[in-house]
Image (cartoon, rainbow, N blue to C red):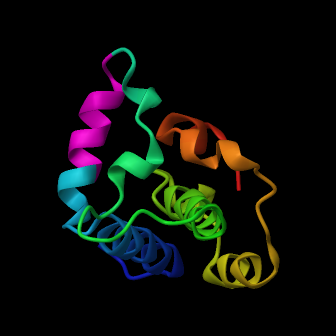
Amino acid sequence: MRLTEKGDVHSFGVLTFEVIMGNHSHEFITTFARKLSSSGAANVLLIDTLDKRLEPPNVEILKEVVLVVKFAFACLKTRPESRPTMDSISHELLTCRLSVGESVYMMTVGKLLSEDV
């Protein structure tokens, strides 16, 4: 295995999920990948995957969580050349704002997976 920038990007995605989910992301990624292959699994609400030890986030914070999760999924793409660079992730985190209304509480993981960053 060779160390590359795209490997660092993948590690960023893994770490992001560990922080957001409150557990080792391998468990989440493995479980979620298995669920995605079954019907209806893409309808899992993002808010239901967040660390249960924390208070539920308000709308503004949840919008930012949605944005970060979208970037984390992009960092975990199977093909390294399909992953964004850390420079682009950094730029997007500093400048991008998600335009989602109150329905952010109904955002599903499947929807986030299907959207390109």
* Residue 58 in picture, x, y percent from top left: 56, 65
Dominant secondary structure of the residues highlighted in magenta in the image: helix
* Residue 82 in picture, x, y percent from top left: 61, 55
The answer to whether 103 appears left or right of 18 in the picture is right
Residue 100 counted in the magenta span: no
Q: Nearer the viewer, residue 84 or 95?
A: 95
Residue 38 vertical position relative to residue 35 in the rendered view, above or below: above
Residue under the point 63% across and 63% down: 67
* Image: magenta residue range: 29-38
Residue under the point 64% across and 75% down: 85
Q: Going by the picture, which residue comes out furthest to the top?
A: 39
* Residue 84 in picture, x, y percent from top left: 64, 67
The answer to whether 54 appears left or right of 117 in the picture is left
Residue 44, quarter of the rendered image: top left
Residue 114, quarter of the rendered image: top right
Residue under the point 21% across and 41% down: 31
The answer to whether 90 appears left or right of 21 in the picture is right
* Residue 76 in picture, x, y percent from top left: 45, 58
Residue under the point 50% across and 52% down: 79
Q: Nearer the viewer, residue 59 or 66?
A: 59
Residue 54 vertical position relative to residue 66 in the rendered view, above or below: below
